[in-house]
Amino acid sequence: MRRWLRRAPERHAQWLYQRAVEHCARIDRELLIRPAGQPTLLGHALNLLAGVALRYRDLFANPEPPWSLIGALSYGHLLAPPLRI
């Protein structure tokens, strides 16, 4: 995990952050108010995605584990950036 965090390109972190903000806006805008401070953009993205996943579970009584939901929220591109064609 640490290696992935160090190697994640800034472009991918920005993409994940944009997805996280979009999902926060749809599920619960309150998640965007004073999120916990993170040292990197990737940290902010993961923090917001985790918040959305947990809120989604609570709102819709979804039994899926948070990491499964985070994977779905990132369209399956949490670890690898989406391919550009």
Image (cartoon, rainbow, N blue to C red):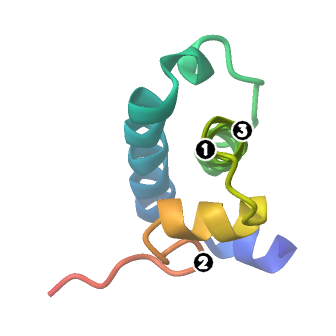
Residues under numbered marks 3 and 1 in contact, where contact means CB atoms less than 8 Å apart: yes
Give how far across and how far down residue 24 sits, in percent.
Answer: 49, 33
**SS for callout 1:** helix
| Front-most of residues 64 and 77 | 64
Amino acid at the residue labelled 1 = Phe
**SS for callout 3:** helix
Residues under numbered marks 2 and 1 in contact, where contact means CB atoms less than 8 Å apart: no
Residue extending furthest toward the front: 61
Is residue 4 at all visible to an observer of this figure?
Answer: yes
Give how far across and how far down residue 21 sits, in percent.
Answer: 44, 36
**SS for callout 2:** loop
Could you say which disc has been placed on residue 58 in the image? Answer: 3
Could you say which disc has been placed on residue 79 in the image? Answer: 2
What distance separates the C-alpha of mark 2 from that of mark 1?
A: 26 Å
Could you say which disc has been placed on residue 60 in the image? Answer: 1
What residue do we see at 40% from left, 28% from top?
25
